[in-house]
Image (spheres, grey):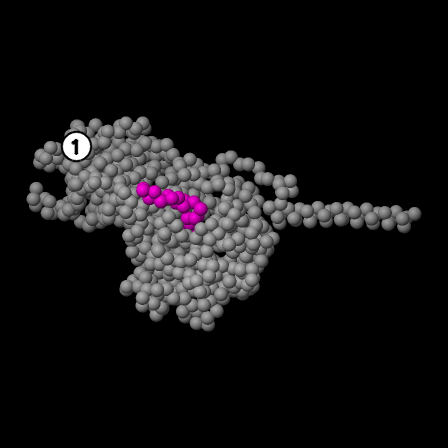
Amino acid sequence: MAKGMFKISIRALLVVALALLARLVYRGFVSHNPSAPAAIAAAPAKVTPRWFQSNGGDNPASVENDTPFPSSQFILNAQWTTPRYFPNPKVQAADIIPVTWADDGYSYVMGDDGSVYGRRGTTVLARILGAPPAGNSIPTTDFELVAQDAFPYGCPKSVTPESCYSVGLTEVNGVFYAPTYDRGYPVVADHPPGHARMDYSLAPVSRTSWVHGTVDFPEVVGSGTVSFVEIGKGAASHDGCPGSAFPNGCIYAIVSQGGYQDPKDPNGIDQFIATKLYLARMAPGTAEHHYEEVTNPGNWRWFAGFDAANSPTWINGNDPNLVRGIRSLSYPRHGSYGCRVETTGCLFWDQSAGNAGHLNYPHMAYDRELDRYLLTFADYYYRDFQPPTESGPMVQGGAELRVLEAPHPWGPWSFVARSAYFGSGNAYGPSFPVEWQGPRTPAGQDLWMIWAANFAGCGNPLLVPADLCQGVYGMNLRRLHLTPAGTSGAIPRPWYDQDLGFASPGNTSFLNGVFKVTGNGNLALGRDAFDQFKDHLDHDTFHYVFQRAEGNDELESSFLLTVNSASGVGREASAGLMVRESRYVIGQTKGELQGRQLSSGDVFSEGARYGYVGVFQDGSVFFQWRDQGNVSRSRSQLRGCIAGCRLKIVRENNRIRAFLSTSHRQWQEVGSHDFIAPFSRSATFGMVATSDSVSTFPAFASYSGRFENVRIRSAVQSLAGR
């Protein structure tokens, strides 16, 4: 009896154990197969709103070039046309967010240390549902988790146990590829027991569909951050890929390397400050060769410099001379498109510390509409702090966006634009997803940029201005408008065109010799006239078309009064001519800024000293200036420009003078000011438009001014003939 009861008890326990095991297997299947039916894997709860709009701390783009790369002659201007959007972290959060457009028509994003609808992982791979809007509405793009912690190789910084990272992603011909870091992370994998490998997955991709690579990257490349050049929907490139070697085209990849490694911080991440950018090409993977064309880096061919005819040369990844033959992409010099075959020690950006010259998570994408390759990366501030450790200013001190363009992946590269305070020192992976590149129109082209950056906390001590401590580790979005050469209305060099301060997007056109400048914002006598910033600091906001001049010069123009009936324009909306103290300083230094503003004399500074001769909507002309933090204004010349007039603003050492002329009469002085401290020798002279209204988006007011017969000339010559 007892023996029978024992047998029954054993059977019961076995049934229970099998049931529990089945349940665990079932749960494991669901967690490892996000594509399982909805009845198995419950859909995430909807979160509203999915996206937020930034509160106004976004900086404008600038096309002023402070790099050794030549200014682009193909893309003449670049302006942000939206504020920054960022996701609700309950929907999507991650850093290093490479995006690829796959054959199934969806774009996919890989995120490190991320989550999708609350499901966290060291890596999360998500399908992007929808695209950013063509208009000015807040995005409705959504995310669907398809793989979580797909690389179970173990990393010292993993969010989830035994998982590891990937910083690149592409899909070509139905096959996904991702560089992974086996028992390490970029830089850590340079040392045993870490390995940088290439994994692949056939579509449809899932958590368990990946096949781990078995071949390390060559030593000279090590575990540098790998990203792929995105071409199109699941497409290979045919640019410079000879049919004899690449009958199905080729895949291009870039790898950043050569950054500083702090010996006291073995987990430090040198790709924040990489000094070299290697370019490789390979054949798309085939089942016949087990996709080793891509997964075996020994099959990659690396850029080895330009020959005497400026043609790129290549060296095989398994060549024993690779360490001596590989060359970084770089800027044109000495008649060459970049680093020559015979050039040794050639860096991507050869400039001394304190200026610029580092790459942080670069990405490259082909712009089919412009037939150009766009290279995007962040360059961190605070170069005078040594060593640039991960726990110090490299992360906490801020970074600037850089955009370059070239006709081929190897170059020759030219400068397009930059944008200050784009994120913390590790402003991760700015890129232009190819699915979201708009059509080229008579006005230019709109492209959406994504990146991940976080200023939350900003570090201690505070290295970044308090009002710039913002951003999220997630898919930040912002739309950039490019103006190619030949675009109707494009402004001519040496004029530059940008918003200043938190002004909703303005613009400028140049047709038949007339500049039409349209801007939002204000040039108020008091600080923060619309109570937008709460910091009691100066916040000039307007649209500015300017050029730089050294020493004493004057700007003269005929001004055509604009009758503006748009609602929301304030009574002090104005347009006119300005001389503004301005010198560009990259980043912050110990002697300047110290967490207050980029520079007291920087083109981005909203509190710089200036002199301004403006025209109100009723034609009244006035002179206004800022000195020692105070804004003052002369008595207006009532209705002096009601029928149009000529305006002139003159810089004479520390004095700025403003003049008015009507009906071809003699110049009449409107006002002048002698600055107490010496006025910077380098200043900007330009045309201004501001609406005297709150900077809001997407609905905002703008005011325009029209300027013709514009000229800058020496003030000494002008005064001699006056």
Left or right of 122, for residue 227: left
Q: Is residue 299 above or below residue 668?
A: below
> In what quadrant of the picture does the C terminus appear?
top left
Left or right of 12, for residue 514: left
Which residue bears the numbered disc 1?
644
All told, the count of numbered labels is 1
**Residue 281 image-quadrant placement:** bottom left
Mark 1, secondary structure of its residue: loop
**Tag 1: amino acid:** Gly
Residue at 51% from the left image edge and 54% from the top image edge = 173
The answer to if 311 sits in the magenta stretch is no
Confirm whether residue 645 shows in the render: yes
Give the magenta range. 424-448
Confirm whether residue 467 shows in the render: no
Residue 605 in picture, x, y percent from top left: 30, 43
Q: Residue furthest left?
A: 721
Left or right of 71, for residue 225: right
Residue at 20% from the left image edge and 41% from the top image edge = 513
Q: Nearer the viewer, residue 253 or 31?
A: 253
Q: Nearer the viewer, residue 623 or 171?
A: 171
Residue at 28% from the left image edge and 64% from the top image edge = 334
Residue 278 in picture, x, y percent from top left: 41, 61
Q: Is residue 364 above or below residue 145?
A: below
Residue 297 in picture, x, y percent from top left: 49, 64
Residue at 41% from the left image edge and 46% from the top image edge = 437
Q: Is residue 223 above or below residue 652?
A: below
Q: Residue furthest bottom?
A: 320
Residue 399 in picture, x, y percent from top left: 38, 50
The answer to if 428 sits in the magenta stretch is yes
